Image (cartoon, helix red, strand yellow):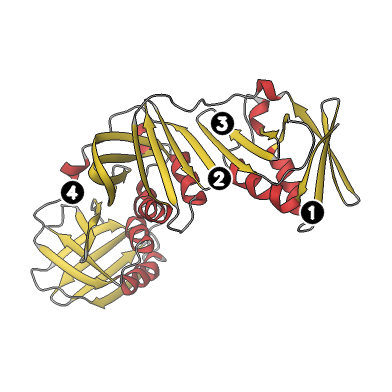
Amino acid sequence: MLLFTATRDALLAPLQSVSGIVEKRHTLPILSNVLIEKKGDALTLLATDIEIQIRNSTSAAQGAEDVAITVGARKLQDILRALPDSVEVSLTLDDKRVTLKAGKSRFQLQTLPAADYPRLSPPEGEGVRLVTSQRVFKKQLSLVQYAMAQQDIRYYLNGLLLVVAGNALRMVATDGHRLAYASSDLDGNFERTDVILPRKTVMELSRQLADSDEPLEITLVGNQIVFRFGHIELISKLIDGKFPDYERVIPQNHSKLVKASRLALLQALQRAAILTNEKFRGVRLMLSDGSIKLVSTNAEQEEAQEELEVDYSGDSLDIGFNVTYLLDVLTNLSANEIEIRFNDGNASALFGLADNADFKYVVMPMRI
């Protein structure tokens, strides 16, 4: 039975957009598959890992009947990638096996029943609905996501806090050693709602969202969040936990202000990082009038020194940090100049931008 025909590109693009969440190994074999549904000339591809579900639609399929099948997502994607561009692809079903034909190429793939495919139902109820642009949301994610924890026993730190309050959308991430905060404006006035997005959802949104002014619709209902943009619908469960009070972590009265070229400081830290201790990754920052000196050493008694001219007038200061935490923030910012506020050698440092109060980055010092 002929399922449908489509060009290779028309099938590959939506498949690539949904298959990123498919796990290579899963206790449920069907979760390695993608659900393909054809209704009329609309083709819908859906993938899930039980926690997240992504659906993408295209109207490029041709075929007489409405059908639904599931096939191995990675195998199908690898086959389509290996075929020539714009080649016509046909899929036929014969006794639980799908045959894919393209030119003189022929592939047979196992299927599992579409009726057995688990789905996340879109949440019902009012909830919170808001609209922003894909570009703004993607940029905001890039400013904070690197500060999320990875496989921390405090499971709520392995995600990203999303706060809707008034006319602001705030994002916060922390791993207990550093914290990143970014805010953007919303149209409308919303009651405060705090939710924690899973790490995988955050990474998938970063990959999928376009750097464009096209709309991104966000719906928050119960323990789920739904993102709709372009032809994509992403439904994700939320992390149930109490996120730390980020407002208490952000320093208010640090008196020592350093203004420096972001790129010059980034490049100097990259060089100093070469000779840091592989385990502790420590670098010392020594402040004096008009300059900052960076010093790193390692277990082999090797040493790197860098000195930069900066805009600073105040008491001298000697403070240590994990160089990775400094490189992360400087890499993900795009401004020419950054501001760093210090208090003393035992207090956290606050990174920010002169013309943007909507971004803050706090990093704890380390003893070196």
Looking at the rendered structure, the secondary structure element under dot 1 is: loop
User: If you read the primary sequence from the N terminus, does the residue marked by circle 1 or circle 4 appear first?
Assistant: 1
In the picture, measured across the screen, residue 50 lies left or right of residue 350, that is: right
Q: Residue 352 placed where, x, y %?
A: 23, 60
Crowd band around label 2 with a 10 angstrom C-alpha radius: few (<14), some (14–19), many (20+): few
Gap between marks 1 and 2 measured at Cα: 24 Å
* Residue at 39 percent of width and 54 percent of height: 142
Residue at the disc numbered 3 = 49
Q: Residue 341 placed where, x, y %?
A: 16, 61
Kindly report which numbered mark, 1 or 4, lies closer to the viewer in this rendering.
1
* Residue at 76 percent of width and 47 percent of height: 6
Residue 285 to residue 162: above or below: below
Looking at the rendered structure, the secondary structure element under dot 3 is: loop
In the picture, measured across the screen, residue 303 lies left or right of residue 55, that is: left
Count all numbered tags in the image, as a single digit: 4
From the viewer's side, name the closer residue of 166 and 158.
166
Q: Residue 5 placed where, x, y %?
A: 79, 44
CB under 8 Å between discs 4 and 3: no
* Residue 154 visible to an observer of this rendering: no
Kindly report which numbered mark, 1 or 2, lies closer to the viewer in this rendering.
2
Kindly report which numbered mark, 3 or 2, lies closer to the viewer in this rendering.
2
* Residue at 67 percent of width and 39 percent of height: 43
In the picture, measured across the screen, residue 299 lies left or right of residue 344, that is: right
Three-letter amino acid code of the residue under disc 4: Ile
Three-letter amino acid code of the residue under disc 3: Asp
